[in-house]
Amino acid sequence: MIPLENFLVLSAILFALGFYGVLARRSAILILIAVELMLAAVSINMVAFAAYLDPTRFTGIIFAIFVITVAAAEVGLALGIVLRLFRERASANVDEANSLKW
Amino acid sequence: MSDLNFDYTLLIPELILAVAAGIVLLADAFHTELRLNRTLLPGFTVLAALAAGLTSLAWLDTSDDFATLLAVDNFTAFFRVLFAFTLATVVIGSYEFVAREIRHQGEFYAMFLLATLGASVMAASQELLTAYIGLELLSFSLYVAVSLAKRDPRSGEAGLKYVLLGGVASATLLYGLSLIYGSAGSTSYAAISETFAAGTANVELPLLLGLVLVIAGLGFKISAVPFHMWTPDAYEGAPLPVTAILSATSKAGAIALLLRLFSGPLLPVKDDWQWMLAVISLTTMVAGNLIALQQTNIKRLLAYSSIGQVGYMLLAVATISDASASALLLHLGGYTVTNLAVFMAVIAFYNRQRSERIADFRGLAETNPYLALVITAALFSLSGMPLLAGFTTKFILFQAAAQDGYLWLVAIAVVMSTISLYYYLLVIRLMYVQEPDGAPAPDPQTGRLDRPNLRWRTSPASYAVTAVLLLGTIAIGLYATPLLEAADDAAAVLFPA
């Protein structure tokens, strides 16, 4: 059996990659993809914990299903807002959304 | 299989909000087919809010925990009433604003109803997943509401920043929750509390990491420094009523969740998180109040002032106990009333002057003395002047926190309150000392003042709402006992004797 640590390390790497993507990418779409990576890391964590620590109940797995569903809703919503901004400025670059500061 | 025979009548307030949100959305979408007058929408929303608030009072002192998913108890009731009051006030005070500035009114009011529903679920949560769903319902509704002012390009930008940073914060929070779930083996508050009380020796590291991530994620939602970057932008770009909801419902909901989490499942590991919250409380009140000093837009000023207020509230969470939880609830009640008074007055001002610049408040005491009075009283209350709500609630809050050994932090909080008085006074000075725009200088020969009549009236709805809030601010300041008793009853649920 694969030890639990492997799953946790995988999810930690995914989470860190996602966070790096959020900081490094300038396109709103790519930032959204990076957020999805972070949420995938959460799902892996949840499912792994559920399988190893709490095998009789499915709390962690149900949690992962909810995370996936909510993430889909979030992307739909965020894309709507990006689209609105794109219509106004013909750009999805977050550096150009700079009329509000301090 | 667990028993599903719960007392579903206890959920009536939430059901009212959910059904009302659906009705408002559909009524707006099909208003031509149904021959509906769209001006009825705000009235209907207010009715739903009042119904939800009143029905939650009907079952005080009864409780059910719905198989440890949700708890309907006095704590939940306190927040349900607070949220319903906020929603009703904001809708009444801003329907003229919405009719003029927002094209899709039905969606706008539906988002308000859903945000209120999400916040109620957060306050009632007894389990991590429920808490998360409530939090996301609140946040998603607000993402949409922030970006609904289609004529204002700032609104889209604010929405984008809010939704992207909000997504990162949710993911961070969730990762933290997953680590806590891994350390405790359950998502139910009661079970987590039991596991941690029995000892955490073998899960020290994941637990600590989980706590850091949870505090970062929730810190974003309540806009604690250094996770506050979205707050001023979202506040400025959002339509004014949404800013009011952001500063009242969204904050109170997150504080309710913090209280539930840190007084229940995480209380056994208090030593691990207490210093984190104390540090965040310190940075929040210092940074919020200092950056507020140099703002020129009233919404941004109120954004930073609300960040400062969050610092005081976190102080009470860091020193959590029976007394400080009740003091925090009292302060939250007083803060909500006072803050709404400012926002409703600013909306009335905006309806007439079409400006959010602080400089344009010049001479308001001359042109509309009533509004100037409301803003003055509310700002004084926010800074903690005696006889007003802010003083009483802050006094009790600081006293409760000081008793728990964080005297140095309380001392800094008092200094920061004094600093906040400075930037509030700048606004008040503009309103009272300076002449309004368009006022002619006195005649050089006779010295007589011959000025056109610059007076203008507030609309009846704004007048009524601001009057109620002004009276509330004064009433809580002079006689806080009823609110204090309600707060005590609510806090007693968190710390059963």
Image (cartoon, coloured by chain):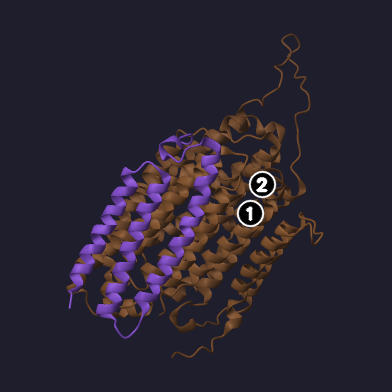
Q: Position of residue B475 (x, y in %)?
A: 62, 57
* Residue B249 seen in render: no
Q: Residue B277 lies in what quarter of the image?
A: bottom left
Q: Tell me if label 1 and label 2 are in contact, CB under 8 Å.
A: yes
Q: Position of residue B61 (x, y in %)?
A: 55, 80
Q: Position of residue B119 (x, y in %)?
A: 52, 64
The answer to whether tags 1 and 2 share a subunit is yes
Tint applied to chain B in the drawing: brown
Residue B440's label in the rendered image is none
The chain that appears purple in the image is A
Left or right, B157 with reference to B462 = left
Q: Residue B6 lies in what quarter of the image?
A: bottom right
Residue B102's label in the rendered image is 2
Going from the N terminus, do you reach mark 1 or mark 2 first? 2
Q: Which residue is rendered at x = 58% and y = 33% of the image? A: B357
Q: What residue sits right under mark 1 in the picture?
A: B108
CA separation in Å, label 1 and label 2: 8 Å
Q: Which residue is rendered at x = 40% and y = 44% of the image? A: B229
